[in-house]
Image: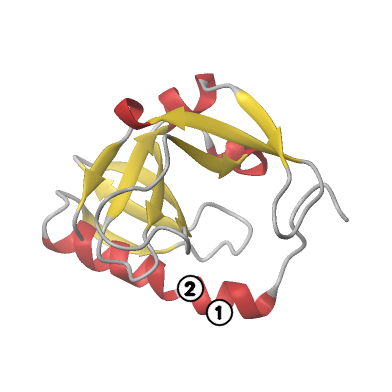
Amino acid sequence: MPTTKPFSQELYDEDDNAKQVLIDYLNRKGGFENARVNPDQYGIDVLAERDSVTHGFEVEVKHNWTGSKFPFSTIHFADRKRKFAVPNAHFVMFNDDRSCALTVMAEIFALAPVVTKKTVYTELENFTELRLEQVVFFKP
């Protein structure tokens, strides 16, 4: 098994609409303007402006989070996403049906510890581990 999750076009396509859910939220009630998909396919997922400052948003879907209550005691983002932990960046995780989400600012993400665990797709993958009190939950 690999140590990082291999890219899957099928999984990417299945979760790609989460970007649009976030874009709609940011433009409607998130306090941002001009939210859009980043044209750089290798860059952070979504870009938006607030007070003439560009912010970036890395988006993912946690399929084993169903309903509004987050079912785990910690939150794990793939540590390979740490490259996006720059000023004015945000990490966003949606539940399976995109009815609830959480977000954490890059400054908190960058300082979080790394843990290694086995997943469905990997033998030993590194994850950034966050505590529930470090994130903000919201309903898009």
Q: Report which residue position mark 2 lands on.
A: 16
Q: Tell me which amino acid carries mark 1.
A: Asp
Q: Where residue 84 appears, x then y in whole percent?
A: 55, 40
The residue depicted at 29 percent of the width and 64 percent of the height is 23
Q: CA distance from mark 2 to mark 1?
A: 5 Å
> Which residue is at the front of the view, 54 or 113?
113
The residue depicted at 51 percent of the width and 66 percent of the height is 39
Q: Quadrant of the N terminus?
A: bottom right
Q: Report which residue position mark 1 lands on.
A: 13
The residue depicted at 40 percent of the width and 52 percent of the height is 93
Q: Is mark 2 in CB contact (under 8 Å) with mark 1? A: yes
Q: Where residue 102 appears, x then y in whole percent?
A: 32, 46
Q: Give the class, few, some or many, for how many residues have Cα within 10 Å of label 1's Cα (few <14, many ≥20).
A: few
> Which residue is at the front of the view, 132 or 39?
132
Q: Secondary structure at mark 2?
A: loop
Examine the rendering and report whether any part of residue 86 can be seen. Answer: no
Q: Give the class, few, some or many, for how many residues have Cα within 10 Å of label 2's Cα (few <14, many ≥20).
A: some
Q: Secondary structure at mark 1?
A: helix
Q: Quadrant of the C terminus?
A: bottom left
Q: Is residue 67 left or right of residue 57?
A: left
Examine the rendering and report whether any part of residue 14 can be seen. Answer: yes
Q: Where residue 31 appears, x then y in whole percent?
A: 14, 49
Q: Tell me which amino acid carries mark 2.
A: Asp
> In terms of image quadrants, where is residue 125?
top right
Q: Where residue 16 appears, x then y in whole percent?
A: 48, 73
The answer to whether residue 127 is above or below residue 12 is: above
The residue depicted at 40 percent of the width and 67 percent of the height is 96
Q: Is residue 44 left or right of residue 11?
A: left
